[in-house]
């Protein structure tokens, strides 16, 4: 195999790797201007995104795929580590979009210049890990790719070295992350014990032919540990507690990246690992499941994941209701959104996966965008409490409208992308019949509940009068009225990123067909691969 | 075909946005928008194939149909589908008329006029959308879009207890909308329709069992009924009316209540005929309760606006009765009544607003003999009251007569309940006029003047229509019966 044919599909990954190395090289050469390294990060991400979209093609089914739909490819018997699937490419595009937004917004951020190359370098490196997750078909490869992302993000959370809260958050993140990695690898080793392979396609084949392969307890335990390990990454209840502290303590742009990008890695890993048993191991064999026999692994996993999904969205929403700080509110809302996404794999049909994928796509713009706004507003010298945002809509109408759109989309109000994604997801759960209808009902009730805390922010922004002295110490008072140019201002790059996110939210909300069509086709192919 | 309905929506949308940002010029922009909208509605009428001038040949289905894909899934399509038939056309005409009248009447609004007129237009946009939407989600979108501007109209421009009233209005109607949405979604998914389009749901709902239809109908009836409002879920209405600014009251009584009636006809009665059939006794009971309760409570009201509000409950009770009859004549009567009530209640709410502006109170016992001071206003109150109590040659008469006739055809002697209540209705209106308009002057503040020109003009528009449609109701009847609804001649 010559280099060109090997490297062709890997162009996006190679571009990101080159970008990372270039940024670190510049750091060594003391070229640390924020605009320079930020520009490289934006350019590399954009270029990679273009290649991914080109691979996807405008006709979604023309996607580059080593696995034809409808069968298990015989050529995969060699246990490859990676395969390009349409859904994987869609996820790559989503990840790259998240990175693009965050790096674009950070371009104009007032940062201590020594930190800039570290920030962008780690950002791009984490993205590289995420791209590898999206193409992995081997458990070990998958977990290692997740590690690449995780280790980069631990450092990202801590990169502002003088910030004690950031360091505390990073420490917490690191310890929890290490634990979850351990759990995941242990689960993978148990599956290896049962099936003799860590290749997901080989496991799929084995499950299609022989269920739990004669080791039902081993397999159950293996998947159990994998649920726990991956649930940490995807911030699912009851493994969610770290997320709020980390999102809250991290620099807000990093929070945006964690919420919009790296946590979706965990969700996609759920898709990869759990679809096969849900599809194929449907019946329990005869005999004692503790010795020989088989268990109905698929239904067991579906019930477990359904319960986790409902718990996650409910706990996230209820706790979000109680928050007084904007970032913590968004963090809890982010947890509840993970619950919605998990519905996709719990139901396990192509429409449900499509709905979850669209929800993840939407989340990049609405939650990522919201964190970017929070960072920008902090740059205007406005405090962290929700009540500090009083009257923002009157003082900064465009920011207020954009943030309002993101919140409305998170709440699932029609004509936003958040509505479309929830509609697709919940109606897919209804369409799947059985007890999944109750997942849709739980999702609907939770959406109704979530309206309260989003609407409260809207009320604070647009209807409450600002406090007599809305500007904290350090704000510059220019002329007769205080200006908003306080702790560094908003920044043009951030304005562009936020405006783009708002435009996407409305455009896809009104005319979702191009995105929706591609995602539907990809999800269908993803399910066909194993069928 | 030319996308006429989309053009109308676009006109209103552009006008609303322009009004919001136009500052001091807002009233002019709002007026221009509503006049343009009225003209386009006229074109919509001329273009309507059911129009007698186009001979008797009818197209099946809806006129000016447009459909574009919105959310296309492999198993379910959600579309932007709009269209009109005779029933929606009449209510669209009502929307256009009330929009112009409200804008003219509110000409003197001083408190943030751009937001006020923008919200008025937005409310009308939502109502228009409800009347043309033929897709469940689109319908729900417009349905909810009506709530928000009305909430702000009451909450910002209302009377002393406006916050309470706005919140109560929002909670009542929002809970009802959720029940309605669940009912509609259950209807779609349970009937196995391939899309959210009215036509698909209409076709696939035929296959539903009687039991399923009954449950779905009841949930839809609750959802739409709170908007009517039906007793015992009516208490939001008097509060909302009393606190709302006059323009808000006009739209609330004239248009928002009609949404309930229209929704019930289009999405419940037409789609679930068996559901209507099995729940008929419940509907009769609720209708009679609303008719009696609204009328008797009207008798005991001191506040003029509250009196008109309770009489609205009475009138909408008759609408519900006419719908529940499940006959083509009843349906015709229901739509006619809705149009008539839209005009007369709007007129009465405008007059009570003017009474409040002129005399500083709406308390009927504390003012009297106002005719010498405000002859124009007195005349307008009289026309409104007489129209509302069903005087022949005014707009309500043909509608109420049709309703009573349909009731007689349907349930025979039960007709004496609404007939008897008509006497009570006449009584409270005449008593009100006697106390307020005639006799020696009482409680009239110094310097009280007759209504300003714009309020008079706004009301005059409605008075003219009251007479015109009272004398020649045939125009409306022809349009309504051309609808492709079972029982009408075209089907």
Image (spheres, rainbow, N blue to C red):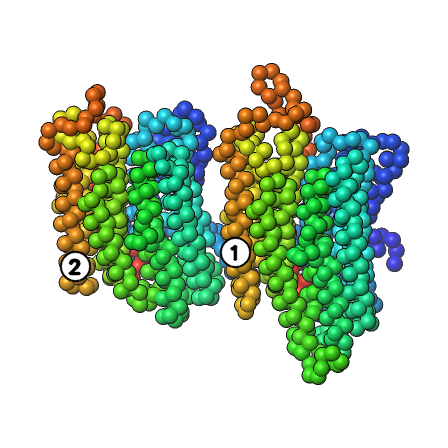
Image quarter in which the N terminus of chain A is found:
bottom right
Classify residue A395 as left or right of residue A141: left
Quarter occupied by the C terminus of chain A: bottom right
Question: Which quadrant of the structure image shows residue A62?
Answer: bottom right
Q: Position of residue B327 (x, y in %)?
A: 24, 61
Picture residue at 32% right of the left edge, 26% below the top: B108
Q: Position of residue B229 (x, y in %)?
A: 31, 50
Mark 1, other Cα within 10 Å: few <14 / some 14–19 / many ≥20: some
User: How many numbered marks does the figure carry?
Assistant: 2
- For mark 2, name the chain: B
Find disc 2 in the rendering and name its residue: B415
Rate crowding at label 2 as few (under 14), some (14 to 19) or many (20 or more) other CA atoms within 10 Å: some
In the displayed structure, B65 sits above or below A381; it is below
Residue labelled with disc 1: A444
Frontmost residue, A224 versus B453 = A224
The answer to whether any part of residue B460 appears in the image is yes
Q: Mark 1 lies on which chain?
A: A
Q: Farthest left residue?
A: B439
Quarter occupied by residue B402:
bottom left
Give x and y (percent) for residue A506: 55, 43
Q: Helix, strand or loop at disc 1?
A: helix
Distance from the alpha carbon under mark 1 to that under mark 2: 44 Å
Q: Where is residue A74 in the image (x, y as percent from the top left)?
A: 78, 70
Most foreground residue, B336 or B167: B167
Q: Tag 2's secondary structure?
A: helix
- Image height of B20 relative to A310, above or below: above
Q: Residue at x 68, y 33 (%)?
A: A493
Residue B38 makes an appearance in the image: no
**Observer-nearest of A331 and A521:** A331
């Amino acid at each position: 195999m010559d280099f060109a044919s090997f490297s062709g599909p890997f162009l996006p990954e190679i571009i990101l790797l080159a970008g990372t190395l270039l940024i670190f090289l510049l750091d060594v050469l003391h070229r640390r201007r924020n605009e320079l390294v930020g520009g490289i990060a934006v350019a590399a991400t954009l270029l990679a995104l273009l290649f991914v979209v080109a691979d996807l093609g405008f006709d979604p089914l023309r996607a580059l795929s080593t696995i034809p739909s409808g069968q298990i490819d015989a050529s995969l018997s060699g246990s490859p580590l990676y395969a390009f699937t349409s859904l994987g490419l869609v996820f790559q595009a989503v990840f790259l979009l998240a990175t693009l937004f965050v790096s674009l917004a950070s371009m104009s951020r007032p940062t201590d210049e020594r930190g800039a190359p570290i920030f962008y370098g780690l950002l791009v490196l984490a993205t590289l890990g995420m791209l590898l997750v999206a193409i992995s078909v081997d458990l070990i490869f998958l977990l290692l790719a997740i590690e690449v992302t995780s280790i980069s993000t631990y450092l990202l959370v801590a990169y502002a070295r003088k910030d004690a809260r950031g360091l505390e958050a990073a420490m917490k993140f690191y310890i929890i992350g290490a634990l979850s990695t351990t759990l995941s690898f242990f689960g993978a080793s148990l599956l290896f014990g049962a099936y003799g392979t860590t290749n997901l396609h080989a496991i799929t084949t084995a499950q299609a032919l022989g269920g739990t392969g004669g080791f039902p307890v081993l397999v159950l335990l293996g998947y159990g540990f994998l649920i726990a390990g991956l649930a940490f990454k995807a911030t699912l209840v009851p493994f969610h507690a770290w997320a709020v502290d980390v999102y809250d303590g991290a620099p807000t742009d990093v929070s945006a990246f964690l919420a919009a990008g790296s946590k979706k890695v965990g969700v996609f890993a759920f898709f990869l690992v759990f679809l096969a048993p849900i599809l194929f191991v449907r019946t329990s064999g005869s005999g004692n499941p503790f010795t020989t026999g088989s268990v109905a692994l698929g239904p067991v996993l579906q019930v477990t994941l359904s319960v986790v999904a409902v718990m996650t969205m409910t706990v996230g929403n209820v706790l979000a209701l109680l928050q007084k700080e904007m970032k913590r509110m968004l963090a809890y809302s982010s947890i509840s959104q993970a619950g919605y996404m998990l519905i996709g794999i719990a139901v396990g049909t192509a429409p449900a996966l499509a709905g979850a994928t669209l929800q993840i796509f939407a989340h990049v713009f609405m939650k990522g965008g919201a964190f970017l706004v929070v960072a920008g507003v902090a740059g205007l010298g406005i405090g962290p409490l929700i009540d500090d945002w009083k009257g923002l809509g009157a003082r900064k109408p465009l920011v207020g409208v954009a943030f309002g759109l993101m919140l409305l989309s998170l709440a699932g109000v029609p004509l936003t992308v958040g509505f479309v994604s929830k509609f697709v997801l919940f109606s897919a759960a209804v369409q799947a019949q059985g007890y999944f209808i109750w997942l849709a009902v739980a999702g609907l009730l939770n959406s109704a509940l979530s309206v309260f805390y989003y609407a409260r922010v809207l009320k604070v922004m647009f209807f409450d009068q600002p406090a007599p002295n809305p500007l904290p110490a350090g704000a510059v008072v220019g002329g007769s009225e205080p200006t908003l140019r306080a702790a560094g201002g908003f920044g043009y790059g951030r304005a562009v990123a936020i405006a783009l996110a708002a435009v996407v939210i409305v455009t896809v909300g009104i005319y979702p067909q191009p995105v929706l069509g591609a995602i539907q086709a990809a999800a269908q192919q993803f399910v066909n691969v194993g069928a | 075909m030319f996308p006429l309905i989309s053009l109308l929506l676009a006109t209103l949308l552009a006008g609303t946005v322009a009004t919001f940002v136009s500052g001091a010029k807002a009233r002019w922009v709002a007026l221009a928008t509503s006049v343009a909208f009225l003209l386009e509605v006229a074109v919509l009428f001329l273009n309507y194939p059911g129009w007698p001038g186009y001979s008797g040949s009818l197209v099946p289905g809806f006129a000016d149909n447009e459909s574009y894909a919105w959310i296309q899934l492999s198993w379910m399509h959600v579309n932007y589908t709009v269209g009109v038939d005779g029933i929606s056309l009449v209510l669209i005409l009502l929307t256009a008329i009330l929009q112009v009248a409200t804008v003219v009447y509110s000409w003197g609004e001083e408190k943030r006029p751009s937001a006020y007129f923008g919200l008025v237009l937005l409310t009308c946009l939502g109502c228009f959308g409800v009347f043309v939407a033929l897709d469940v989600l689109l319908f729900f979108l417009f349905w909810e879009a009506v709530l928000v501007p009305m909430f702000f109209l009451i909450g910002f421009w209302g009377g002393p207890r406006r916050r309470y009233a706005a919140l109560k209005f929002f909670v009542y109607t929002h809970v009802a909308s959720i029940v309605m949405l669940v009912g509609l979604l259950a209807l779609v998914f349970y009937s196995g329709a391939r899309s959210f389009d009215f036509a698909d749901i209409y076709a696939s709902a035929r296959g539903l069992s009687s039991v399923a239809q009954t449950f779905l109908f009841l949930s839809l009836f609750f959802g739409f009924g709170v908007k009517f409002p039906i007793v015992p879920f009516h208490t939001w209405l008097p509060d909302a009316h009393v606190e709302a600014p006059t323009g808000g009251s006009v739209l609330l009584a004239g248009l928002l209540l009609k949404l309930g009636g229209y929704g019930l006809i289009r999405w419940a009665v037409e789609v679930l005929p068996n559901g209507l059939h099995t729940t008929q006794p419940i509907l009769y009971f609720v209708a009679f309760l609303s008719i009696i309760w609204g009328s008797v409570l009207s008798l005991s009201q001191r506040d003029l606006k509250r009196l008109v509000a309770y009489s609205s409950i009475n009138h909408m009770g008759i609408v519900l009765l006419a719908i529940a009859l499940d006959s083509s004549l009843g349906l015709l009567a229901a739509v006619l009544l809705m149009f008539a009530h839209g005009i007369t209640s709007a007129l009465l709410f405008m007059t009570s607003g003017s009474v409040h502006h002129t005399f500083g109170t709406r308390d009927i016992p504390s003012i009297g003999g106002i005719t010498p001071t405000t002859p124009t206003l007195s005349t307008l109150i009289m026309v409104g009251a007489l129209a509302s109590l069903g005087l022949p040659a005014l707009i309500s008469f043909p509608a109420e007569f049709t309703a009573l006739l349909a009731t007689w055809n349907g349930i025979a002697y039960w007709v004496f309940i609404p007939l008897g209540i008509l006497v009570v209705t006449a009584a409270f209106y005449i008593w009100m006029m006697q106390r307020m308009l005639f006799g020696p002057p009482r409680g009239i503040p110094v310097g009280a003047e007759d209504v300003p020109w714009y309020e008079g003009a706004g009301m005059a528009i409605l008075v003219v229509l009251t007479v015109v449609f009272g004398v020649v109701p045939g125009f409306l009847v022809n349009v309504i019966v051309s609808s492709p609804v079972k029982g009408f001649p075209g089907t």
